[in-house]
Image (tube, rainbow, N blue to C red):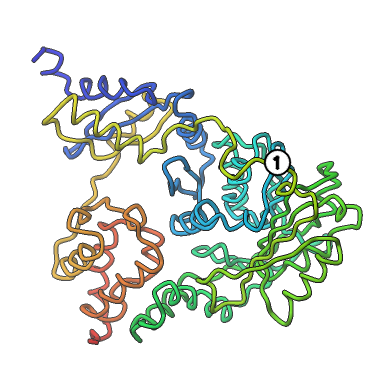
């Protein structure tokens, strides 16, 4: 063993990490008081452009309250909560819900995304159509900020319109659900939305065998997820958007606006209608709305089909697909999935796995780092390393119960302070199971449901369970 290896183990680790093509530079530091090392990585701008741009956004202080979520090996997004990012990825990228029944995009398409949320559909459209120009409309400030960040880190040509879209210009009252933003809107109804979410949760859990306890937990979970904030937002029209941005055609208009879909259509002028080639929209079939929307589209020359996601069978949500003759799917457009796009490089969890494997092979027996973080400035990162607190897990009978429940769902290896509920694959249905089992043993109010979606790590949740024992709680219920 060399003198360098004896006196500078951190430097030896960093040198091996720099061997990876996606790493431009690396530093390894041990927090004060000991504990697993922290690795700071500077991503290579050519081999890891997605991570490089992400680090630049965060270094500039533009991430704000958003967090990075990585639902796939080639997708990293800024979002408000991981469960929604995972849901949107599954719906848009995996289930391909917007590109069915012949709907497709040519290269260089013009796309308008109304109700963009964090921009997941916007990113999907950019991938399917090299050179696409996308106008993304989102009235909620934190979501509009996420669209802008996600467009930047994925190098997509996106213009963000931070307004709602409706029948006329002006303002509107808007309901924002911070823990379930996809259900936010001008026509939000907490009771109806709670029933919709509860139906989705129970359908996903195989409602025929759902225990009454699970129904109670679903009610509580839906109530917490739909804690509402009321805001006033600016409203514009599609006609105004087209005029402001010089749009003479729209290859695909996507609309997901939670019951305001007919208002969006009413804001389209006859001239703009003529330039719209395809529309995909979610329609809430209330009071004959599906029939009304279908007639409007057919009267404008579109062929229309609709379908309902089986998971939404207990809701009024229906997907509508409208295409004009000669739209991309009829003109020899490329088959889905064949578009060429630059390699974005690895996301952090994939790069981390590769780096851990590299260290295990090159430095066998060396303790693995605790975590990996991205930076653009190793000097500043080094100054912050000592400030990072070590996560701890409380030791109590209540915490041990929580640990057993957690291990029963995720496995014994997941019982560690930094293990994240969503990184382990948890979702709303998993949350139901965790809460049900915990309440069976510790009673009601053992854990506030919204904490799963806000703090999320085993250590933080175990601490919350321990703290809840200091307050009176309901008796444990048996099946």
Residue placed most toward the observer, 189 or 201: 201
* SS of the residue under disc 1: loop
**Numbered label tally:** 1
Residue 211 appears left or right of 135 = left
Q: x, y (%) of residue 321?
A: 69, 61
Residue 85 appears left or right of 164 = left
Q: x, y (%) of residue 391?
A: 24, 49
Q: Which residue: 62% across, 76% down?
A: 316
Query: Split into 4 quadrants, where in the image is the C terminus?
Result: bottom left
Query: Split into 4 quadrants, where in the image is the N terminus?
Result: top left
Give the labeled residue for mark 1.
106
Residue 233 appears left or right of 315 = right
Q: x, y (%) of residue 221?
A: 42, 74
Q: Is residue 62 above or below residue 140?
A: above
Q: Is residue 352 above or below residue 275?
A: above
- Single out the residue that lies furthest toward the top: 3
Query: Neighbour class for label 1 at 10 Å: few (<14), some, many (≥20)?
Result: many
């Amino acid at each position: 063993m060399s003198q360098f290896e004896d006196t500078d183990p951190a430097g030896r680790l960093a040198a091996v990490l720099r061997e990876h093509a996606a790493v431009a530079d690396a530093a390894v530091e041990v927090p004060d008081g000991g504990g697993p090392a922290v690795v700071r990585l500077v991503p290579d701008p050519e081999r890891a452009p997605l991570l490089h741009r992400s680090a630049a956004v965060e270094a500039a202080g533009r991430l704000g309250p958003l967090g990075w979520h990585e639902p796939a090996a080639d997708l990293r997004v800024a979002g408000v909560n991981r469960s929604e990012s995972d849901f949107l990825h599954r719906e848009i990228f995996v289930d391909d819900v917007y590109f069915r029944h012949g709907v497709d995009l040519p290269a260089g398409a013009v796309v308008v995304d109304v109700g963009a949320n964090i921009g997941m559909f916007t990113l999907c459209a950019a991938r399917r159509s090299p050179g696409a120009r996308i106008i993304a409309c989102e009235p909620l400030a934190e979501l509009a900020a996420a669209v802008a960040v996600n467009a930047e880190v994925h190098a997509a040509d996106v213009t963000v319109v931070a307004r709602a879209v409706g029948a006329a210009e002006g303002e509107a009252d808007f309901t924002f659900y911070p823990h379930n933003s996809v259900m936010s809107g001008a026509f939000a109804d907490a009771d109806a939305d709670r029933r919709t979410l509860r139906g989705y949760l129970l359908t996903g859990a195989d409602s025929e065998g759902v225990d009454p306890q699970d129904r109670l937990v679903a009610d509580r979970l839906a109530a917490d997820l739909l804690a509402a904030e009321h805001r006033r937002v600016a409203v514009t029209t599609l006609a105004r958007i087209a005029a402001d941005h010089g749009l003479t055609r729209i290859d695909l208009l996507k609309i997901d606006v939670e019951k305001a879909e007919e208002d969006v259509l009413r804001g389209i002028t006859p001239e703009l209608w003529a330039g719209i080639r395809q529309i995909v929209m979610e329609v809430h079939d209330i009071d004959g709305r599906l029939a009304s929307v279908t007639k409007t589209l057919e009267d404008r020359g579109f062929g229309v089909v609709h379908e309902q996601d089986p998971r939404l069978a207990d809701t009024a949500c229906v997907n509508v697909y409208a295409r004009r003759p000669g739209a991309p799917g009829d003109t020899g457009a490329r088959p889905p999935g064949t578009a060429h796009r630059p390699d974005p490089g690895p996301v952090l969890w994939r790069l981390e796995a590769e780096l851990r494997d590299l260290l295990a092979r090159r430095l066998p027996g060396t303790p693995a780092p605790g975590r990996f973080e991205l930076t653009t400035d190793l000097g500043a990162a080094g100054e912050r390393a000592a400030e990072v607190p070590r996560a701890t897990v409380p030791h109590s009978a209540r915490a041990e119960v929580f640990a057993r429940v957690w291990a029963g769902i995720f496995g014994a290896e997941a019982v560690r302070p930094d293990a994240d509920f969503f990184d382990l694959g948890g979702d709303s249905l998993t949350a139901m199971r965790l809460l049900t089992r915990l309440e069976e043993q510790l009673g009601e109010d053992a854990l506030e449901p919204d904490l799963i979606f806000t703090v999320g790590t085993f250590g933080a949740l175990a601490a919350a369970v321990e703290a809840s024992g200091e307050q009176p709680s309901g008796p444990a219920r048996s099946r």
